[in-house]
Structure formats: C-alpha cells, structure tokens
Image (cartoon, rainbow, N blue to C red):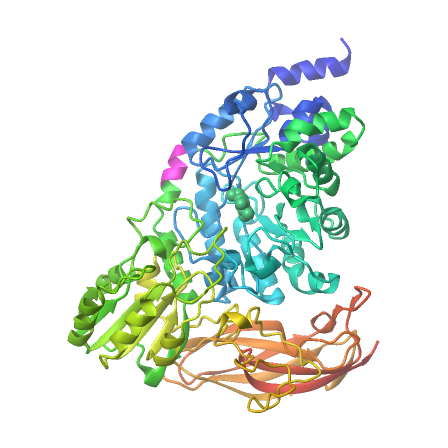
C-alpha cells in the first residue's frame, strides 16, 4: 500500500479532526483539499436555507438531509439553536470527508437580546457601545450553535426611501467606516475560534446603498471616484478590522451585477485589499443575473460568478447544478474552485470546527448565555445613547415629577413588537420587550399615566380621536408616540412617501389643539418627514427602534436619568423632492448665498436646499461652548501633521456628552470637493460647569481624496477646518495650508 493511499484510508476512518494538528491552517486546508472530489468541492461552495426563508423560496427540489450526508452542502443559513444545529451537523458528519458545516444567520441587531436597529445605534456615535452590543449578539448567537452573522451591513445610504437604510450606519463614509470597525470587532471578539466570536460578514459589496430611487434590488450607477470616495471606505475598513467574510449584492454597478464583478471581488477585494476570507453571494444573486439580462441561464450565471470571485452560492443552486459541467467542458478552471474551497475551509479550521464540529452547540451554555441579565443592561444603555433630541422648547424635558397626570397617546405607545424593528431573529418573542407604556410604569413615579391609542399606524379611521382628545384634556402633558411601523424598514421595504403614515399627524394636531404641552416620540427605521410635529410639538425625541429595552431607555431619557447625546447619522429631509440630501454638498458655480435671493442659483423655487434636521444634529439637556481654537502650525508639508487644540465646556446645569465633530473643506482642488467632509469625532462627557481641552490631529490622509486618475492623495492649498456639534452648527474655524511635499 503506498503512503498516500494509506493516509486517505486512515482519514476516512477517523474524522479530519486528527489531521496533523500541529501544522499550519494553510497546510491542513491543502491536505483536506487533496482528498476532495470535484463534487465535494462544489458541495463546499453550496449554501442552503433551512425551514425559514429570508428571500423568495427557490425552486430547487433537493432532499437536504441526503445532500448533507453526501457532502453537497457546505453551509446552512436560517438554522439556529443548539438542538437543530447539532442535528444538522450530525448529518454532515455522515458524509465521506466529514467536513463540518457553517451555520449562518442574519444577526443584524442582536440575537435574543435585541439592540437598537443599526441606523439608530449609529446615532450614538459611541464606538465602544456599538462594539459591546455586537459582542453580546455574538455571544448569544455562538451559544446557539451559530458561526456566522450576515452583518454588519456597511452600505452607505443617502436615500431614506430605501428600506435598508435601517441596517447601516447612515450617509457618511468616515462615520460608516468607524462603525464598521466597531461592529466587526464586536462580532469577531479577540479572534475567531473563541466561543464568544462569530464570523462577521461585511455586506453588500458594493454600492447597494445607491440603488436607483431607493428601490430595492435595483441598479447603481456612479463614477469610480464616487465609488471609491463614498461607498468603498467602510468595506476597506471592515477588511482591515479582520472581517472573515463578505457578501456581494443584488444591484448592478454600472451595468454589471456586483456578484459578477471581477473588478469588485478580484481586483479590489482579494487583490488590492488582500482579503483572505471568502465571499458569499446574496440570496440567489447568482440566479438573478438571468432576469437582470446579464446571463442567458443559471449555468452562465454560475460561470460569471465563480470567475468574478463569488466563493459561496447562497440559495441559487446554480453552483451545484453547473460548476461540475463547466469544469468538464473547460469553461472554468478547477483552480478557481480550489481557491474558493480553500478560503471556506480555512474559516472552518479557524473556528475550530475540524477539532469539534459541535463546539458551539452546548445545551447548558446556550441556557446560561441566553439568560444573562447583563445583556439587558447593555441593551438599555445602547438604546438610551441612540435617542436623538430634535427639539426641546423651553426645556420642557426632562419631565417634571410634579405632573399629576400624563397622557400617553398614539399607536406606538403600548406597542412591543414594533420596538424590535425589522430583521430580528425571534420576531414573535415580544413578552420581554419593554414598550413605552411599560417603561413609564416601571419607574413607579407618583404621576398617573393614562393611555389612548387615537388611531392605527396606517389606515384612515379617526374613530379613536375623541378618546385621545379627552385623555389629553385630563392630563398636564401628553407623550405622543408616533411613527412608521417596525416592519416598514428593512429589506423590500422601500417607501415612496416617507411621511408618518395614516392619520397620525392629524391626531397630533387634534391633541395639540387642546393646548396641552406635547412631547413627541417619533419612531422609525429611516429619516421620516413629520412637519406638524417638528413645528408644533414642544419637544421631539427620535427614538428609532430601540429593541428589547426600548421603553426603559425612553423613560430614562424622558426623566433625565440619561441626558440625550445622540446625533443624526443621516440627514432628515424636509420634503421628498429634496432626496437625496446629504450634508456634504458642493458649493456649485452658483451657490445660494442669501436664501431670499435664489434666482439663477442652485436652489429650488419651492423648497429650501437644507434638510429639516442635518447630519450630526442632536440636542442635549445641557449646553456646550466651543472656544480657543489654536493650530500648532498654519502651513505644513505632507509628511507633517497639524494639531488643533480647543476648549469644550459644559455651560448648562446637567452632566452630558457632546459629539464633537471635525469637518474639512479642500477649497481648491483638481476635483471639486464637498464643502464639508467629516474627518474625525470624539464623544466627550462633561459634568455641569466642567471644561476640557481637546485635540484633533490632521494628517495627510484626512486631506486626501481620489483625483480623476483615482490617485488618493492630498493636494497643496488651503483647507478650511471646522469644528462643531453638528454639520450645520460649526463653532470653530481655522484655515491651514498644505505647502507641498
Ligand atoms: C439579504 C441579505 C441577507 C440574506 C440572507 C438577502 O435577501 O439581502 O442581506 O443576509 O438575504 O437572509
């Protein structure tokens, strides 16, 4: 018996676990690959969904159990929990090579403990809080047998009509990149292989956030400069933070489906960025090349996808059906498959699954981790930090304890389910969710709370108005809980009209007409338009969908136990016609200098250019003063840095945190630059009356951009540096000059 034959037989008798454990992972991957048949390789590239589906059900008629046992499946999505993952892994362990499965799931903002929707949480600008919630999600998911989350979504999105704005970090590439890093690190912990770590998946690569008119699954068309400047940075940040996997996207980019884009996946991601993880397709995005009109059939689509660097096929079954034939016909080289398989096996080794395929499936650990009460405290903290105070007339908030009666009015006042938002793993587990009403009750205040729903979220009935008005009349103050419903954002939830739906704003006006002060809690997973509330409410808190602890966190903020510190990560338009509206506008050749004189200017005749609430905006119960900006030098060279020093003081009566934002404007460049670009921020806590000296260091990178040849560098000239508490509230300015090399 020759040595190789003996080796193979030995491997077939014992799991691959014992493959010389002291060798490097790459060597171990190679030795497994050598044993694999073509079909077994294709099996590793094939991912199927379990019983739940998160996309249109595919027409494949396969016997999954049999496929597991015969090595036709490398990964499953939508299978979770120790019991199910164990059972299914056990089937895969009956396959010839016993290669363990990967279990993936959309753990987008929490597993069992639900945290604020990602856009809401991004409003905290608190990277540590964001890392912490992703880490708890990873702990819970990994204790339930999962190895992999399809998160974070790092798509920059500037169109609030797109339902998926809710899943990302908003409109800005710099903020989006910082948050991408925090989320990847949170999910993946110290390193893959830890029992509290799951693989992150940066998605959707790329430019999905630019889908035309906010319509889901649509085309994106843009210059390469725009792609590199706005849409790619968070993905690059995710690679640098060690993201184990990427997901490509449904959209075309300049006519080519992202799933078939060698430019994105091979040239940029695996080439220039040296990404050594693997890329999973989006749900049937390989199959969708056919209706896109890019491939004549699934076989051609599979050929495009594998050549372009899509390693794993989620749910289209095109790889399984066609890759073997394509190799045999010489249309693709088997080496392409080998590379994809190696990337996937490597992650299975890193997760420790070859040592123990059930290591994430332990009943006791699942019980302990999922009942850990500390997770709720982290959820409450993250939720409070995500709330944005948009308005607070005459400091009506925090609420006074002297109010005898407060009326909670509106369709979201007692809702539990909506508080979870969309993309939750257990959408029907609402028993532990804290509604606004519950949160107020939990405080045991002396104030009496009464409730009237008034109307539904959608629909045209005003039958409940009278009761709501009567409740308002009995009260000293009204808390008006309003917004869209929790499932109006997320995938396939594009809206052409982003006003608060139904009769809610009419209800608001009727309640306001009683003369009682009204504090509005506006809820949604996207920027909404709510003119009457914005103009007439006494106070407005934008509370997104805050998750399991929503009501407690809202009550904490209403009563001032937590002083709101959230700032908008995306602009809120005044009207739909302004969309897309983002803070980083261009000066244009005809800037609006005086809003009263817009003739022949870059303006609307019927609407302001400015959003209702700007990127970076958010109030506090205290006030902050910015002063004494100094630059250590006014002129500098490319290899030098400029340090800006200034004082921030809390000039109000409450302790609070301010998100100090740094913007720059490259005033003259070979490519016209936006008038403001975020280049840094710090979240600073100050007691009442306290001051701190703060610094920002400006380096070449902060001043660099992609020129027309896609060269990334800073050009000599003047830069205006702006520091303030919002993109539309600049408190300090300084011009510095880059003089050359
Ligand atoms: C979504 C992805 C998601 C996948 C699996 C797709 O429809 O676009 O974001 O991860 O389904 O559920």
Q: Nearer the viewer, residue 380 or 320?
A: 320
Would residue 132 appear left or right of 380 to someone viewing this image?
Answer: right
Quadrant in which residue 394 is drawn: bottom left
Quadrant in which residue 234 is drawn: bottom right
In this rendering, the answer to whether 335 lies above or below 98 is below
Would residue 614 appear left or right of 414 to someone viewing this image?
Answer: right
The residue located at (51%, 67%) in the rendering is 125
* Residue 560 showing in the rendered view: no
Q: Is residue 364 magenta?
A: yes
The residue located at (79%, 31%) in the rendering is 331
The residue located at (48%, 27%) in the rendering is 88
Magenta-colored segment: predominant secondary structure: helix
Q: Nearer the viewer, residue 685 or 260?
A: 260
Q: Is residue 477 magenta?
A: no
In what quadrant does ligand 1 lie?
top right
Would residue 687 appear left or right of 14 to someone viewing this image?
Answer: left
- In the rendered image, residue 11, in percent from the top left (x then y), is placed at 65, 18
Residue sticking out furthest to the top? 1
Magenta region, residue range: 362-367
Q: Quadrant of the N terminus?
A: top right
In this rendering, the answer to whether 195 lies above or below 550 is above
* Numbered circles on residues, count: 0
Would residue 626 appear left or right of 81 to someone viewing this image?
Answer: right
- In the rendered image, residue 320, in percent from the top left (x then y), is placed at 64, 28
Q: Quadrant of the C terminus?
A: bottom right
* Residue 338 showing in the rendered view: yes
- In the rendered image, residue 151, in percent from the top left (x then y), is placed at 54, 49
- In the rendered image, residue 62, in percent from the top left (x then y), is placed at 54, 24
């Amino acid at each position: 018996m020759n040595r190789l034959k003996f080796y193979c037989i030995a491997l077939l008798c014992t799991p691959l676990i014992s493959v010389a454990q002291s060798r490097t992972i790459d060597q171990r991957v190679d030795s497994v690959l050598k044993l694999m048949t073509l079909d077994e390789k294709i099996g590793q590239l094939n991912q199927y969904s379990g019983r739940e589906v998160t996309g249109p059900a595919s027409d494949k008629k396969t016997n999954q159990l049999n496929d597991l046992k015969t090595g036709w499946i490398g990964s499953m999505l939508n299978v979770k929990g120790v019991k199910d993952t164990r059972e299914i892994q056990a089937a895969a362990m009956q396959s010839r090579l016993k290669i363990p499965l990967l279990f993936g799931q959309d753990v987008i903002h929490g597993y069992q403990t639900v945290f604020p929707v990602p856009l809401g949480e991004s409003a905290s600008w608190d990277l540590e809080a964001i890392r912490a919630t992703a880490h708890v999600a990873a702990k819970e998911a990994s204790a339930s047998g999962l190895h992999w989350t399809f998160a974070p979504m790092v798509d920059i999105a500037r169109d609030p009509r797109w339902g998926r704005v809710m899943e990302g970090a908003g409109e800005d590439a710099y903020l989006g990149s910082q948050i991408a890093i925090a989320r990847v690190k949170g999910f993946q912990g110290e390193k893959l292989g830890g029992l509290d770590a799951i693989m992150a998946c940066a998605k959707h690569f790329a430019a999905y956030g630019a889908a035309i008119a906010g319509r889901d699954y649509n085309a994106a068309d843009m210059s390469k400069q725009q792609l590199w400047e706005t849409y790619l940075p968070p993905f690059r940040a995710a690679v640098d933070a060690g993201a184990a996997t990427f997901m490509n996207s449904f959209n075309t980019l300049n006519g080519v489906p992202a799933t078939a884009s060698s430019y994105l996946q091979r040239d940029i991601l695996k080439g220039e960025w040296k990404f050594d993880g693997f890329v999973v397709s989006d749900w049937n995005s390989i199959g969708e090349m056919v209706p896109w009109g890019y491939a004549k059939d699934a076989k051609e689509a599979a050929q495009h996808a594998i050549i372009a660097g899509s390693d794993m096929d989620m749910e289209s079954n095109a790889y399984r059906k066609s890759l073997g034939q394509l190799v045999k016909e010489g249309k693709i080289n088997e080496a392409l498959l080998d590379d994809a398989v190696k990337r996937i096996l490597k992650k299975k080794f890193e997760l420790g699954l070859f040592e123990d395929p059930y290591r994430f499936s332990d009943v006791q650990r699942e019980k302990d981790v999922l009942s850990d009460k500390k997770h709720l405290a982290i959820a409450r903290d993250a939720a409070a930090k995500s709330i944005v105070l948009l308005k607070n007339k005459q400091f009506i908030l925090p609420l006074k304890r002297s109010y005898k009666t407060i009326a909670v009015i509106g369709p979201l006042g007692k809702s539990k389910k909506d508080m979870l938002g969309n993309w939750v793993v257990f959408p029907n587990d609402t028993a532990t969710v804290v509604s606004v009403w519950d949160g107020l009750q939990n405080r045991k205040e002396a104030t009496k709370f009464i409730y009237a729903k008034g109307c539904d979220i959608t629909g045209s009935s005003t039958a409940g108005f009278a009761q709501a008005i009567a409740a308002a009349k009995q009260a000293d103050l009204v808390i008006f809980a309003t917004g869209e419903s929790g499932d109006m954002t997320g995938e396939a939830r594009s809206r052409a009209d982003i006003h608060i739906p139904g009769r809610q704003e009419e209800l608001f006006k009727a309640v306001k007409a009683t003369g009682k002060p009204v504090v509005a809690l506006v809820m949604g997973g996207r920027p909404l338009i709510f003119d009457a509330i914005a103009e007439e409410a006494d106070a407005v808190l934008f509370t997104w969908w805050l998750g399991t602890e929503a009501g407690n966190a809202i009550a904490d903020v209403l009563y001032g136990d937590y002083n709101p510190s959230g700032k908008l990560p995306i602009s809120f338009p005044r009207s739909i016609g302004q969309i897309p509206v983002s803070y980083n506008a261009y000066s244009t050749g005809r800037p609006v200098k005086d809003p009263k004189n817009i003739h022949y200017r870059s303006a609307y005749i019927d609407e302001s250019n400015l959003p209702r609430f700007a990127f970076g905006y958010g109030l506090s119960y205290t006030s902050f003063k910015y002063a004494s900006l100094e630059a250590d030098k006014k002129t500098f060279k490319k290899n030098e840095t400029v340090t800006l020093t200034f004082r921030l003081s809390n000039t109000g009566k409450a302790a609070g945190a301010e998100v100090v934002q740094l913007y720059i404007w490259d005033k003259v460049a070979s490519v016209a630059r936006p008038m403001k670009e975020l280049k840094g921020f710090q979240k600073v806590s100050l007691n009442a009356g306290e001051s701190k000296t703060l610094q920002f260091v400006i380096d070449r990178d902060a001043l660099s951009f992609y020129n027309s040849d896609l060269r990334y560098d800073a050009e000599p000239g003047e830069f205006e540096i702006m520091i303030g508490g919002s993109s539309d509230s600049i408190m300090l300015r300084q011009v510095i000059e880059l003089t050359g090399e």
